[in-house]
Amino acid sequence: MAEENTPERKSELDEANQLKDEIMQGLQVGEPAERLMLKAVHALALMDNDSVSYEEAKRTLIAIYGDTLGQKVPLEIELEEFTKRLKKIKVFYQKAKADESEEPDTLARALNSIRAHERRIDYLKDRLSKQKSKKN
């Protein structure tokens, strides 16, 4: 029970409550149901001290509803995820290259990762643009 009172646990519960507020606001402004569902799963996982369910739900949503069914919102979520990761990898790569702080093979792997992320981002943007052109 002492675990319940740690600052980290309090922070998780505060985040869960914030997510619940965001869900209610999202319902009122018409936020897509997929995003609301992910927030709900995230809030439940935080309340239950579950470190797996949220990431699993997000991966499944992207794989089934995005990749397989080609639905817009899951594709947008995946695009956001890849864009965030790409920025982090680029920062690492640029800093490591400038500082000469990493081995050449590490820099090569980072550069390959950048290229792979850029290809996936281009692919996702292409799929999303084709969806928009189908609707018009």
Image: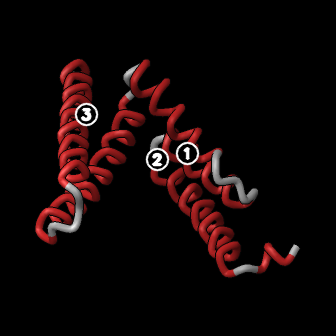
Up-down: is 92 above or below 125?
below
User: If the image is split into quadrants, where does the N terminus sit?
Assistant: bottom right
Query: The residue under label 2 is which amino acid type?
Result: Gly
**How many residues crowd mark 2 within 10 Å: few (<14), some (14–19), many (20+)?**
few
Q: Nearer the viewer, residue 29 or 97?
A: 97
The residue beneath circle 3 is 120
> Mark 1: which secondary structure?
helix
Q: Which mark is residue 55?
A: 1
- Is there CB contact under 8 Å for labels 2 and 1? no
Q: Of callouts 3 and 2, which one flags the residue occurring earlier in the amino acid sequence? A: 2
Q: Nearer the viewer, residue 86 or 92?
A: 92
Gap between marks 2 and 1 measured at Cα = 24 Å
User: How is this picture coloured?
Assistant: secondary structure
Gap between marks 1 and 3 measured at Cα = 19 Å
In this rendering, would 132 be left or right of 34? left
Where residue 39 appears, as percent x and y from the top left, is 56, 51
> Mark 2: which secondary structure?
loop
Up-down: is 26 above or below 82?
below
Query: The residue under label 1 is which amino acid type?
Result: Glu
Where residue 111 appears, as percent x and y from the top left, is 18, 46
Q: Of callouts 2 and 1, which one flags the residue occurring earlier in the amino acid sequence? A: 2
**How many residues crowd mark 1 within 10 Å: few (<14), some (14–19), many (20+)?**
some
- Is there CB contact under 8 Å for labels 1 and 3? no
The residue beneath circle 2 is 30
